[in-house]
Amino acid sequence: MAEQRVEFNSDNGIVLEGLLFEGSSGRGVVITHPHPLYGGDMANIVVETIQKACRKKGHTTLRFNFRGVGRSSGHYDDGNGEQADVMAAFNFLRKKGLQVIDLAGYSFGSWVIAQMIDKTPADSVIMVSPPAAMMQFESTTPIPNLKLVVTGSHDEFAPPDVVEQLFHTWNPDAAFTVINGADHFFFGYTDQLTSILLKYL
């Protein structure tokens, strides 16, 4: 079964567009995309890679466009309104009857998730290339439900040494994986990313 187009409401009357795949595992995953001001949207190849890996595990997935992206109404809100968008996606899956819901973010999408970690009862969190060299992460904030962090050895926005320092304060019990040769966009490395995701999903 293919993904189906859906719409759901965020705050302040904002309507978001998404793509929903209904799996059979009983687990849902909300997938967030890279920076809206740099062309990021739910059709991004890394977002698609995460979705396909979740789908292989039979999980229900919801990837969506943040406010102001594609057909989603509203405007970019410096990560603040975007947190409400993630919560709206989370609640959309909950209304579908899913009790176990994960968050998986790529780049800016992982930064948004990190900002709201105490606001959502996500079962586990996966962060792909959290852009620690580009955006300010709160290094002292633990992310107890963090399960996996992945970046590339040549990722200039999520340099492995910088991300690893944050990782130890987020949750040292989580898995931290560096894909040798990959940059921030994972061109030519999506198969390796898929293998890693399948191991931890």
Image (spheres, helix red, strand yellow):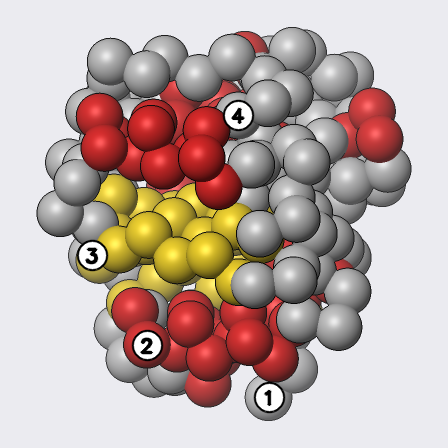
- Marks 3, 2: nearer the viewer: 2
Residue highlighted by disc 4: 132
What amino acid is found at the position of numbered circle 2 in the picture?
Answer: Lys
Residue highlighted by disc 2: 199
State the CA–CA distance, disc 3 to disc 1. 22 Å
Q: Earlier in the sequence, mark 1 or mark 4?
A: 1
What amino acid is found at the position of numbered circle 4 in the picture?
Answer: Ala
Residue highlighted by disc 3: 99
12 with respect to 98 (left or right): right
Q: Earlier in the sequence, mark 3 or mark 2?
A: 3
Disc 2 crowd rating (10 Å Cα; few below 14, some 14-19, many 20+) is: few
- Marks 4, 2: nearer the viewer: 4
Disc 3 crowd rating (10 Å Cα; few below 14, some 14-19, many 20+) is: few
Marks 1 and 3: in contact by CB < 8 Å?
Answer: no
State the CA–CA distance, disc 3 to disc 2. 22 Å
Residue highlighted by disc 1: 1
**Front one among 79 and 148:** 148
State the CA–CA distance, disc 4 to disc 3. 31 Å
Identify the image quadrant of the C terminus.
bottom left
What amino acid is found at the position of numbered circle 3 in the picture?
Answer: Gln
Residue 165, above or below 6: above
Q: Secondary structure at mark 4?
A: loop
What amino acid is found at the position of numbered circle 1 in the picture?
Answer: Met
